[in-house]
Amino acid sequence: MSRFFKAEISGSDILNSDICLLSLKPHAEYEHPLPGQFYMLQAIGCYDPLLKRPFSIFSIKNNNLSFLFRVRGKATKILSSLKKGEVIDVIGPLGNSYPEPGSDFVAVAGGVGVASLYNLIEKYSCRAHFFYGAKTKDELVLLDKISSLAKELTIVTQDCSCGLEGVVTDACADAICIPDSALNGLPVYACGPNPMLKALHSRLSGKGIKCYVSLEEHMACGVGACLGCVVKGINEYKRVCKEGPVFSMDEIQW
Amino acid sequence: MVNLSVKIGRLELPNPVMTASGTFGYGQEYSEFFDIERLGAIVVKGLSYVPKQGNPPPRIAETPAGMLNAIGLQNIGVDRFIAEKLPHLRTLDLKVIANFFGDSIVEYVKAAEALTDSGGVHALEMNISCPNKQAGWIVFGTNPDAMREVVTAVRKATDLPLIVKLSPNVTDIGMMAKVAEDCGADAVSLINTITGMCIDTKTRRSKIANVTGGLSGPAIRPIAVRMVWEVNKSVMIPIIGMGGIMTAQDALEFIIAGASAVSVGTANFINPVAAIEIISGIESYLLEHGIADINEIIGSLKT
């Protein structure tokens, strides 16, 4: 069972705005991923883009691995336009995973950061107090499914086009910090853009809350060899691909 | 059967394909993908006498058919390499080439001595593309006098086969190779990355924190092949060629231009089994062309 294998496109849908849900059927037996792990994906035989791109596992169903991503540059554009049956190169599952939540938990997704948390709430269904934020309604995807998998779903948009108005970090931190909140003491799992995670850190640090964040960085190898994807830890650089992508919030210099 | 074994000075390799420093860790990261004993040699991540933290992120950026990196030579240091990584490498039937560097001549010499005494290292590869911080930040590999001084000092410090890894950021790489040869190097390897930059026009910042980085990948291959050809004309010692090798055909270009062996670098990131595919691709080429020995085509460019 190699972590480097070929897989064919079994489904590709552009959801709201420019978010793609890509499903792959591995050509060989594959290792089952854990929530929070990631894969390096690349169309075959292409030198530009040269490098594979890292994507969190979104879901595994009927032997299909699926990935949710925003179409932003050349690589994601190529991946999103592949036809059913076309074959791509895959390395994974890679990196660590979200620690198992012992209890109910809080999940905070910013935009397409939902990609990495979806598998977690799927695995631990009806246990997540899920806060899902985006700039605008258009960027929110799969709300029905998320709502059925979460114990409770709070939607936040910056332009108030859906749910509460504001940013998801405030909505989440406010809900945790009110006196006698049912969320107080639950572990928090977060994924989203760096400024969002930084904001979450500044709201939650020092409150004795266990908080895990999944980070994204440019990567070359994905397996710990190139040292290209490091982030600043407290004492040393940490490889997002190897020591991460999931970090305890207090391991990172924000 | 064809003969794939080649010699780099006294060092005999079972085949001419090795992995380039900094792209293959210390072997562990890729050993799940293939049997690394099948490699001609492994060149480990560059080591310094004193461990180095490396540069702040972002450290890499992709460019057309290439990538820029400014990792900043992050490494665990010679002592930890010998204590933690070498014991496993020693158990393998695999030639180990230790790449090393220093911020001063003293540090080069200390690293070379420690690696030589370690037992288990079969050859040394000197990275000279770093500045001499004690002597005005002159880059060893781009100034013939600075290079002569450091290679001479390291040559005295080790009896292992010594490979000098040349910088392409020079006007006349043939002349630099000659300096290495005159100072007693057993071989030269080339090319190291080409200094480059790319800028995010939205933020008007470089895409890597260090501002400049080293360009690698298929984008640099024609430059690297040309440099191997030039060096082949100017020195007698063996050449290890590298720079954007992705396939066996690419590797053969270097060999025909004059390289006795090749290193696979950036390709490992894209295809973790690239090196193995290149070894079997070279073998198939020799069989197809009725060539019994790889050595017959080294430097066989027709002009």
Image: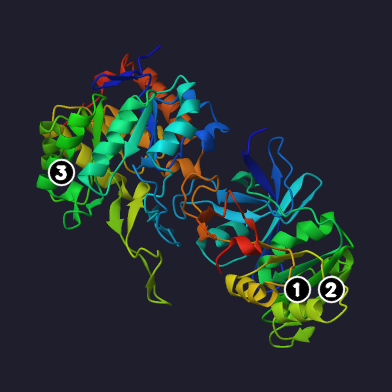
Q: Quadrant of the N terminus of chain B?
A: top left
Dot 2 or dot 1, earlier in sequence:
1
Q: Which residue is mark 3?
A: B147
Position of the C terminus of chain B by quadrant:
top left
- SS at badge 1: strand
Q: Do pointers 3 and 2 mark residues of a single chain?
A: no
Q: Is residue B280 above or below residue B303?
A: above
Q: Nearer the viewer, residue A51 or B87?
A: B87
Return the x and y of residue A38 as percentages of the image width and height. 65, 52
**For numbered disc 3, what is the local secondary structure?**
helix
- Mark 1, Cα crowd under 10 Å, few <14 / some 14-19 / many 20+, is many
Give the amino acid type for the residue marked by disc 1 in the picture.
Tyr
Decide: marks 3, 2 in contact (CB < 8 A)? Answer: no
Query: Label 3 to label 2, Cα distance in Å?
Result: 64 Å
Quadrant in the picture for residue A54? bottom right
Labelled pair 3, 1 in contact (Cβ < 8 Å):
no
Q: In front here: B135 or B28?
A: B135
Q: Are marks 2 and 1 in contact (CB under 8 Å)?
A: yes
Closer to the camera in the image, A138 or A232? A232
Q: Is residue B12 above or below residue A126?
A: above
Q: How is the image coloured?
A: rainbow
Q: Amino acid at mark 3?
A: Met
The image quadrant of residue A101 is bottom right
The mark total stands at: 3
Please identify, in this view, whether the residue under mark 3 or under mark 2 is nearer the observer.
3
Residue at mark 2: A153
Residue B241 seen:
no
